[in-house]
Image (cartoon, rainbow, N blue to C red):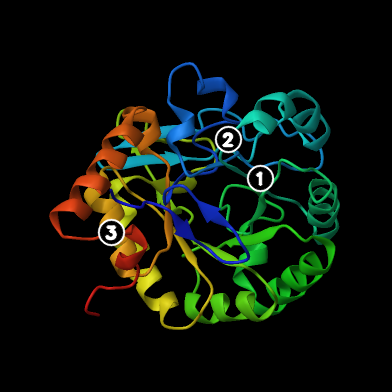
Amino acid sequence: MVDLHVHLGKQFNLINPVMTASGTFGYGDEVADLVPVTRFGALVTKSITLEPRTGNPPPRITETPYGMINSIGLANIGLEAFLREKAAFLASYPGKVIVNVAGRSANEYHQVVAKLNEVDWVAACEINVSCPNVSEGGIEFGKSPDVLDKLVTSLRKITEKFLIIKLTPNVTDIGEIARVVESAGADAITLINTVYGAAIDIETRQPKINTVIGGLSGPAIKPIALANIIRVAKRIQIPIIGVGGITNGADVIEYLLAGASAVQLGTVNFFKPLIINEIIDYLVHYCEEHGIDCIGQLIGQAEI
């Protein structure tokens, strides 16, 4: 028997290393009749903000040959409605529930995280300081080490929950950003959010999304994500959650070898919604084939 459990510290244990990625799985309840959600090690909700957001005007999603560009703009139902309408499903979810949190200001992050700290079924908060599709907050927090240091330090004082910071690759030195986040008290880091991308319709000569530039995700960004994980793993001791372009079980193994302790599935959920079954079966098969008892033995074992 292969043990797929992974341990991210502070007694934050997962039945397997595969999570959903924020913004690609809704709040979980929308797809529960179609996708075996209980096979995920953790369910990460779409970003929650203090007040409801309608997001950016359409068109706000377009396909590319190797992924998609989105500019959703953190559309969500807001904290109050989230806790009222989604609690029944999420409280009954057998795995870990991680709530992704976004805000326009430090105060908004504080209010949301403080409220979530009181909710039993919330296992962790993933702080989104990396969204490229909003004019306020988002990526602006993740670009400045000083600003990020103050934000994470203050959030650490507010919550006892497992605290994850989701970083952007759109910076000069992601290793330094990660080091600051670790020093400020984060328990783990998620790498990476989307990279900047654009597309133009050659017939209309218009951008394919309303905001012109959005976030590119999907298979095209996997090499970028791996490179960032390798860089960051050399600078920090806290766990890394890898995300970006994973489409099969072999990708998951590659992420673990690069230094990620767990992974998230994002864009693949849209075109292969049952992929979690294939991935879990592959992880077991790979470990059996290579004489590995516990999948955690693979973490960081690439000869880099």
Residue 204 in which image quadrant? top left
Q: Position of residue 35 (x, y in %)?
A: 43, 24
Q: Report the residue marked by disc 3.
A: 293
Q: CA distance from mark 2 to mark 3?
A: 24 Å
Under mark 2, the amino acid is: Pro
Q: Residues within 10 Å of mark 3 (few under 14, many from 20)?
A: some
Residue located at (83% from left, 57% from top): 110
N-terminal label among 2 and 1: 2
N-terminal label among 2 and 3: 2
64 up-or-down from 197: above or below: above
Q: CA distance from mark 2 to mark 1?
A: 15 Å
Under mark 1, the amino acid is: Val
In the rendered view, does 145 fall on the left or right side of 302? right
N-terminal label among 1 and 3: 1
Q: Nearer the viewer, residue 287 or 111?
A: 287
Q: Secondary structure at mark 1?
A: strand
Q: Report the residue marked by disc 1.
A: 99
Residue 267 in which image quadrant? top left
Name the outermost residue toward the top. 33
- The reply to whether the C-beta atoms of the residues labelled 1 and 3 are less than 8 Å apart is no
Q: CA distance from mark 1 to mark 3?
A: 31 Å
Under mark 3, the amino acid is: Asp
Residue 221 in which image quadrant? bottom left
Mark yes or no: residue 192 visible: no
Residue located at (67% from left, 51% from top): 135
Q: Report the residue marked by disc 2.
A: 94
Residue located at (29% from left, 67% from top): 257
Q: Residues within 10 Å of mark 2 (few under 14, many from 20)?
A: some
Residue located at (57% from left, 81% from top): 179
Mark yes or no: residue 205 visible: yes
